[in-house]
Amino acid sequence: MGGARAVQDLMFPHHALDGSGRMGSAGLAAEAWSKIRFLDEPVCDGCGTPFDYDMGLLVRCAACEARPRAFARARAACLYDEASRDLILQFKHADRLDLAGLFAGWISRSASDLLAQADAIAPVPMPPTRLIRRRYNQAAEIARPLAARLKIPYRPGLLVRRAGKSQAGRSGAGRRRNVQGAFQVPAGAGRVLQGKRVLLIDDVFTTGATAEACAKALLKAGAAAVDVAVVARVREAAHISI
C-alpha cells in the first residue's frame, strides 16, 4: 500500500505546475497535459525509441540491433518536442526545482519495469564547473525523490565527471567524442557496485552518448548491468540545443 501511495503522490501533485492554476492530471493543467506525448508501448526494448506499431515483446530497433549499447535498456517518459521542451528547460535553467517531483512521477510510470529490477539509482553527474554555475544537478533532483519514495538505494557518488564542454548543439559523433572517458567511478564506490544493477537517471536522451559513456564506466568498475531512465527523448538526434 505504501509503495502504491508513493507512486500516486509522485504522479499526482496537488497543484498545477505549468502556472495555469487549473489542475489537470499529473500536476499539469488539462490543456498542457493533453499536448505531452507520453511514450507508452510500443517502444524499442533497447533505447526506448517509439515504434509506430506493435512489433512484439522485447523487440529492438535497427540501430540497437546493428550497434548494441553498453547500457541494457532505456526508457523515456515522453517525447522531447515543443510541448515538453519548455517545462524541461525551465527545470534545467530557471530554478524550477518544483518540477522535480513531477518528472520523477513520470519516470516511475514509464520505467516501472526497470525500477523493479534496480539495485541502486544514480544520477548522471555534471562537470564541477557547470554544477557551481547552475547550483544543482537536475538529474540528481529527479533521482533523489524517485529513490526515496520507491525505497531504492540512492547512490549519487557512483560516478564523477571531469570538466568538459556541453553536449548541446553537437552531432551524434561529436557527442560521443565529447564524453569519451569523461566519467569515472571513484575508488571507494567500486565496492558498492559489485554485481549490482544500476538505474541511471537523466533529463533528456538525445543520441545516448552520455548514457553509453556512463554505462561503460560503471560496468568496468563491476556493475552487473546498467539501465537508463529519462524524462524525455528526441525521436531523431541531430544538432539539438537542450
Image (spheres, helix red, strand yellow):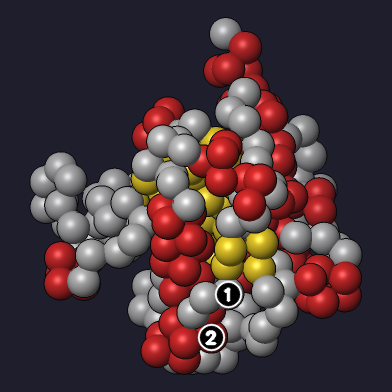
Reading the image, the residue beneath label 1 is 182
Left-right relation of 73 to 124 = left
Compared across the picture, whether 4 is left or right of 74 comes to right
How busy is the neighbourhood of tag 1: few (under 14 within 10 Å), some, or many (20 plus)?
some
Query: What is the quadrant of residue 113 in the picture?
Result: top left
Q: In front here: 114 or 220?
A: 220
User: How many other residues sit within 10 Å of disc 2, few (<14), some (14-19) or many (≥20)?
Assistant: some
Residue 189 position in % (x across, y down): 62, 45
Q: Are marks 2 and 1 in contact (CB under 8 Å)?
A: yes
Quadrant containing the N terminus in the rendered view: top right
* Residue occupied by mark 2: 178
The answer to whether residue 111 is above or below residue 124 is above
Give the quarter of the image for residue 124: bottom right
For residue 83, side relative to residue 64 (left or right):
right
Q: Which mark is residue 192?
A: none
Residue type, mark 2 in image: Asn
Q: Is residue 135 visible?
A: yes
Report x, y in % for residue 112: 43, 34
Locate residue 209: give its quadrant.
Answer: bottom left
Relative to 165, residue 182 above or below: above
In front: mark 2 or mark 1? 1
The local secondary structure at tag 1 comes to: loop
Residue 210 spot, x, y in % from top left: 50, 70
What amino acid is labelled 1 in the image? Ala
Q: Residue at x 43, y 45 (%)?
A: 223
Residue toward you, 177 or 239? 177
